[in-house]
Image (cartoon, helix red, strand yellow):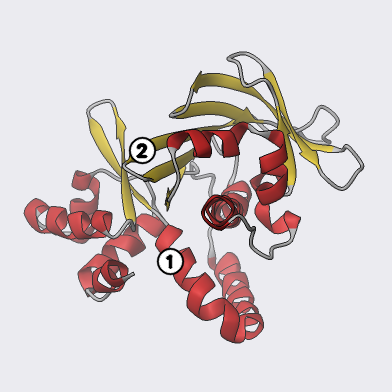
Amino acid sequence: MDSVFKALADPTRRLLLDRLHEHNGQTLRELCERLDMARQSATQHLDILQRANLVTVVRRGRERLHYLNPGPIHEIEERWISGFDKPRLQTISAIRNRAEEYAMTDESASVPTYVYVTYVRASAEQVWRALTDADLTARYWGHANVSDWQPGSGWEHRRVDGSGAVDAVGRVLATEPPTRLVVTFEDTPDAEAPREPSVVTFLVEPHHDIVRLTVTHENLPNLEMLGGISRGWPAVLANLKSLLETGEVLPQAPWEMSPAHD
């Protein structure tokens, strides 16, 4: 956490994070233009933010897109804020967010890709199994993800409350055990207003006894879903990390852990 606090201590780096929060997935050129900052200076600050895992870079062809990674901030919230006065802070946050909603213009801007990075002390094979084993997903996700995980196969996001209800479905687009899994997230056929499928890529990059797990959620249909998965993915992956590293899951309600619900 020392590198995170050091990175956040600089006002220029906080401003870079603010700009990525406003518009995620920017190139270095776009960030420099918005901040009137020299490329060399921006690069140095972004390098520090990357080392602190606050920013992650995704390559798209010849471009390098910078994404705000909320993982370390979520860990700060879990460690120092949740145990103190979270209910009061949530109320204040809800009031502020409601005011911001009224201030927003009603324009159909494109929704950016959501990227989340976390580090898990486990092997790539263990992380892969956690992503694809129905019994394990039921423990940390609150839903069993059921499939044979072959390209072209379907998969279901089943409740574990005994009802057998399915809250989301999808298709497996690509599978490269134990490093890469790509699936669609789709509404069930009986949904009143089915949304266009979104696409989730799980990238597992091993390094000694630690794995860097990157989740990229693309083709989001609207800002409402972006807001939902921004709460859901951190909870899901924090629970996966806890299960693999300690054998226990975090005390969270299942609805708090599922991006598919939003």
Picture coordinates of residue 62, whole percent (x, y): 22, 28
Is residue 218 visible to the viewer in this orientation of the structure? no
Please tell me which residue is depicted at 68% across the width and 65% down the height of the picture: 251
Q: Quadrant of residue 51?
A: bottom left
Please tell me which residue is depicted at 69% across the width and 58% down the height of the picture: 256
Observer-side mark, 2 or 1, equals 2
Gap in Å between the C-alphas at discs 2 and 1?
Answer: 23 Å
The residue at the far right in this view is 163
Q: In the image, is 109 to the left or to the right of 155? A: left
What residue type is disc 1 on?
Ile
Q: For numbered disc 1, what is the local secondary structure? A: helix
Q: Quadrant of residue 27?
A: top left
Residue bearing the label numbered 1: 73
In the rendered image of this protein, does residue 99 appear above or below residue 109? below
Q: In the image, is 65 to the left or to the right of 201? A: left
Front in this rendered view, residue 208 or 216: 208
Picture coordinates of residue 123, whole percent (x, y): 44, 40
Circle on res. 206: 2
Please tell me which residue is depicted at 52% across the width and 38% down the height of the picture: 126
Q: Quadrant of residue 209?
A: top left
